[in-house]
Structure formats: C-alpha cells, structure tokens
C-alpha cells in the first residue's frame, strides 16, 4: 500500500479519490469545507467529461439530474445571432449535483480530513494538489512565481426558476461585455462578464447584480428579463483568476490536477471537464504503472492539451470582451452571419 494525500475535495479531488485503487493506495482527502456547497450554477459537460463520468460510474446519475443544452448562438448585444453552435450531446449539470455524485462515488476506505492545509503534507509521500486556482500545493512546491494571476474581469452568474426560452439562448457579445443565457435543470442559467473594479475578494453579489442591471440595460430585452428575475441568493460573483503556465504538472512527489494545474478563463466552459479527465487519467496510470512512470505519463498526456485549452479560452475571452476592437469584430461576425448558415436562424 502506498499513501497519497489529496489536497482539495472539489471536482478534481473527489474524482481522483473515487478512481484510485483502494487495494493499492491508502488515500486521504483534505478539504477545508465541512460540507458540500448548497449553491452553485450550471457546468457544461463535454463528451470527454462524460466519458470520465462513465469511468467514475456516475454518468447515468449525472444525466438524470442534467439538462440537454441544445443549440446556442453567438449574438450581438441586440440579440441578433451571428453564429449558431450545435450543442450535440452537451449537457448542463449543477455543480451542487456533480459534487454530490462524486462524493458518493468515493470509497469508504478513503480517509476524509476537514482541514485547511497550509503546508504540503507528507515527506516523500505522494501529494496531489487538487486545491483549485489558489493552490497551496502549487505555491509551496512550484514557488511564488506560480501563484494565481488576477484578471480584470468579473464573472457574475446564477439561475432563475423560469424555463429557458430557446429563441434567446446563446452568448451576447457587446462592447467590453458578454451575457450568456442557457438551459439549467428546472430553469434558466445565466452568466455575465465585464471588466470591473469590484473585488478581488468578497464581492457583494447584490452590488454586482446592480452593476449588471445598469451595464446591460440597453442590450437585448431577453437579458433585462433574466436580470430582473435574478436574486442574490441564487447568484455568485467572483473575479476571474488563472494559473500561470507550468513546465510540468509534476515536481518530485507532488502532482497537480484540475484548476491547481491549469485554471483557465471560463469562456470555453472546459475547466471542470478537464479537471475530471485529469483525475481519471492520473488515477488509471497510478493504478497500473510504477509511480514515477505514471506521473511522467500523466504530465505528457495532460499538460499540452490543457495548455492549448487555456490559450484558446483566453483568446475567446479577449474576442468576447473586445472593447476598442469591437466594431472590427462585429464587422467580421456580421460578414460570417451573412455568408454562413446562421443567416437563416430565427
Ligand atoms: C464563472 C465560471 C464558469 C465556469 N463554467 C464552467 C463550465 O461551464 N464547464 C466547466 O467544465 N467548467 C467551468 N468552470 C470551471 C470550473 O468551475 C473549474 O475548472 C472547476 O471547479 C475546477 O475544479 P477543481 O476541483 O480543480 O477546483 P475547485 O472547484 O476550486 O475545488 C478545489 C477544492 O479544494 C478546496 N481547497 C482549496 N484550498 C484548500 C486548502 N488549502 N486546504 C483544503 N482544501 C482546500 C476547496 O474548498 C475546494 O473544495 C467555470 C468557472 C467559472 C469561474
């Protein structure tokens, strides 16, 4: 038996704990939250994440509490669609439900410790940093240069109980802001981003909602209806942080998974998906190979792919939140709409 300490019992940490072979690993999960969160918005699950959920054994359970996302359009601020994106098999699941299902998949043999880790545990024993964008493991083992980076952008999001109107689903790109409307299990999921002086910590959700209502007042009427129905209790507001690129996700006996390794901007909706995939890949390699070979293979399989997604996501954010370049961007997208199939979209 080899000991492994997992710092962080969020999406990545629970998925890793669920997949490690209990006959080979003595697993401890350190999580600072005493309970699973009760508020969370919707996460889009891409096909690779669905395969990871199947490996964990919770795909059917996840589907049962999810909603199919369907097609969505990239639109101008007034709501006119430029490009329609086919949703395919994408489904949306509440973070609360996803964490509950992952938690239920963790074997009873796993030791749960409710504690905020301040120093990386163990001496030479395997440590997995699954502690999110502000990872203590990354800071302690990779050094202060690997600390999270603050973006000037705020993300405000929430759910409202009224069911989504499919005619208005999509992402609305204005001048320096974006607003998204999508289906949620039992209602509508919405999100908004713009450069904001609020934060970086302890952002007052009410104040952020007020800013959003003023900022989007002249946008499409669908946005106004969603924001009128939004309540602070069902909304979250945070500044966007990202992890800097690392030369390796492995250093000595420490390995990073999820946002601790590659926190990216949310614009491609891939962070949680890639966190699940990281953990399944790492667990399967550790279950079948000697430790050093497993860690090296994990880094090879996951680092470049997640780096590419981080870069793509940042580029998407830049385009969606274009300010000075907004007329040029809109001109290009107007042209794409005239030439492409979105022209016939209602
Ligand atoms: C606005 C927004 C929208 C998003 N939308 C999507 C989406 O649609 N689809 C998608 O795939 N992804 C999305 N993401 C990204 C997704 O939320 C993250 O990628 C995902 O939560 C990462 O999971 P994680 O387990 O690595 O980290 P986290 O979810 O941050 O979990 C880390 C855990 O570690 C614990 N922890 C932290 N520090 C310590 C410590 N020192 N000691 C003990 N415990 C600790 C925390 O309490 C937490 O439980 C979005 C992100 C944002 C900001």
Image (cartoon, rainbow, N blue to C red):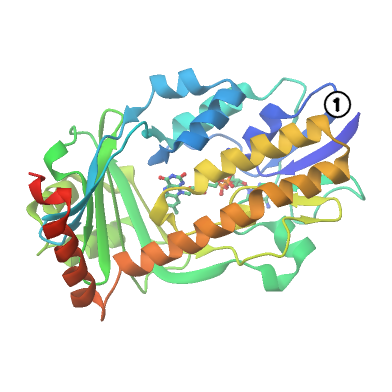
Q: Does 153 sit left or right of 303 as displayed?
A: left
**What residue is at 80 percent from the left and 23 percent from the top?**
22
Is residue 202 something one can see in this rendering?
no
Quadrant where the N terminus is found in the figure: top right
Residue 307, picture quadrant: bottom right
Name the one closer to the observer, 237 or 247. Answer: 247
Q: Residue at the far bottom: name it.
A: 324
Name the one closer to the observer, 236 or 246. Answer: 246
Residue 245, picture quadrant: bottom right
User: What residue is shown with label 1?
Assistant: 24
Q: Position of residue 38 (x, y in %)?
A: 44, 35
Q: Position of residue 63 (x, y in %)?
A: 41, 23
Label 1 sits on a secondary structure element that is loop
Q: Does 339 sit left or right of 196 as displayed?
A: left
- In the depicted structure, whether residue 331 falls above or below residue 290: below
Q: Position of residue 5 (x, y in %)?
A: 79, 41
Is residue 158 something one can see in this rendering?
yes
Q: Position of residue 340 (x, y in %)?
A: 17, 53
Name the one closer to the observer, 159 or 68. Answer: 68
Pointer 1: residues within 10 angstroms few (<14), some, or many (20+)? few
**What residue is at 67 percent from the left and 37 percent from the top?**
281
């Amino acid at each position: 038996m080899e000991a492994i300490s997992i710092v962080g019992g969020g999406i990545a940490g629970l998925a890793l704990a669920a997949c490690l072979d209990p006959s080979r690993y003595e697993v401890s999960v350190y999580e600072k939250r005493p309970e699973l969160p009760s508020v969370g918005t919707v996460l889009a699950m891409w096909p690779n994440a669905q395969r990871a959920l199947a490996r964990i054994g919770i795909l059917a359970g996840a589907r049962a509490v999810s909603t199919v996302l369907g097609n969505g359009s990239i639109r101008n601020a007034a709501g006119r669609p430029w490009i329609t994106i086919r949703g395919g098999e994408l489904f949306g699941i509440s973070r609360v439900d996803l964490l509950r299902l992952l938690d239920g998949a963790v074997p009873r043999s796993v030791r749960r410790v409710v504690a905020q880790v301040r120093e990386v545990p163990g001496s030479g024993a395997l440590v997995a940093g699954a502690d999110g964008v502000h990872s203590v493991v990354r800071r302690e083992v990779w050094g202060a240069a690997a600390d999270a980076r603050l973006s000037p952008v705020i993300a405000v999001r929430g759910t409202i109980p009224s069911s989504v109107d499919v005619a208005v689903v999509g992402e609305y790109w204005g001048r320096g802001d974006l607003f998204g409307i999508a289906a949620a299990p039992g209602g509508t999921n919405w999100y908004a981003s713009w450069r904001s002086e609020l934060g970086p910590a302890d952002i007052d959700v009410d104040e952020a909602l007020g800013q959003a209502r003023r900022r989007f007042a002249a946008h499409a009427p669908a946005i106004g209806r969603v924001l009128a129905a939004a309540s602070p209790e069902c909304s979250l507001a945070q500044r966007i942080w990202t992890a800097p690129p690392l030369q390796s996700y492995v250093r000595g006996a420490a390995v990073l998974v999820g946002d601790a390794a590659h926190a990216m901007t949310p614009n491609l909706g891939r962070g949680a998906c890639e966190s699940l995939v990281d953990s399944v890949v790492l667990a399967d390699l550790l279950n079948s190979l000697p430790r050093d070979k497993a860690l090296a293979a994990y880094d090879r399989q996951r680092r470049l792919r997640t780096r590419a997604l981080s870069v793509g996501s940042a580029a998407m954010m830049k385009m969606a939140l274009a300010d000075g370049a907004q007329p040029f961007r809109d001109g290009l997208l107007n042209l794409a709409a005239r030439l492409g199939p979105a022209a016939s979209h209602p």
